[in-house]
Image (cartoon, rainbow, N blue to C red):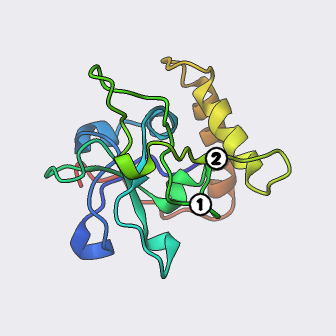
Amino acid sequence: HISYNFLCIFLQFSGHHGTWMPNDKLAQVFDKRFYQELVSRSWVPRQPSIDDPLKTDWTTGDPNTDRPKMMLHTDICLFYNIEENGNCCTRTDLFNTNGESHCRPEWENNQCSVYDEDHPRWEASEAVKRYLGAPRVNDDNGNFYEAFRMAWLKATMNGMHDLKPVMDSC
């Protein structure tokens, strides 16, 4: 259940544009911030695709900036159940100082649901909670690093001998 932690996506290669952090340098820090961003921000569909929901990406903040924050549909579904209703906002409980919702008006009253214990993806959402280590933002990366250590051990013991170093920037 370890998701990627280094993300920069370019429109010309994938049809998506953005990163989940404000800049490439922060997106390349190897820690649990990806999961903190996932659960602590109001993510909404940026370009909903009716034909193929996997083509939908999600944004938070101003989607029209030159560095829009974005996550893929597969990122959001690690924690939120967006299969049946993907036209929602992940955090309808967040507001600006002027009282305006962080969600776009069309989704401000439509909270994305989380997985029930009997859903096949419930285990993934529980893993996200474990990586976070606490309900509030904190600097303890221990659970995330331990899970990565175990995944890395499995990957390298199964013949992954030609892994390449991460690039300095996207």
Q: Residue sitting at 50 percent across and 71 percent down? A: 54
Front position in the image: 149 or 87 = 87
Q: CA distance from mark 1 to mark 2?
A: 9 Å
Q: Residue sitting at 50 percent across and 17 percent down? A: 138
- Say above or below: 162 vs 111: below
Quick one: which residue is furthest to the bottom in this view?
A: 51
Helix, strand or loop at mark 2: strand
Amino acid type assigned to the residue bearing label 1 in the image: Asn
Can you identify the residue that label 1 sits on?
A: 85
Q: Residue sitting at 64 percent across and 28 percent down? A: 143
Can you identify the residue that label 2 sits on?
A: 113
* Quadrant position of the C terminus in the picture: bottom left
Front position in the image: 80 or 34 = 80
User: Can you see residue 79?
Assistant: no
Amino acid type assigned to the residue bearing label 2 in the image: Ser
Q: Position of residue 147 (x, y in %)?
A: 65, 38
User: Can you see residue 110?
Assistant: yes
Q: Is 60 left, or right, of 80 in this rendering?
A: left
Q: Are marks 1 and 2 in contact (CB under 8 Å)?
A: yes
Q: Position of residue 67 (x, y in %)?
A: 19, 49
Q: Is 1 left, or right, of 137 in this rendering?
A: right
- Say above or below: 98 vs 55: above
Q: Earlier in the sequence, mark 1 or mark 2?
A: 1
Quarter of the rendering containing residue 144: top right
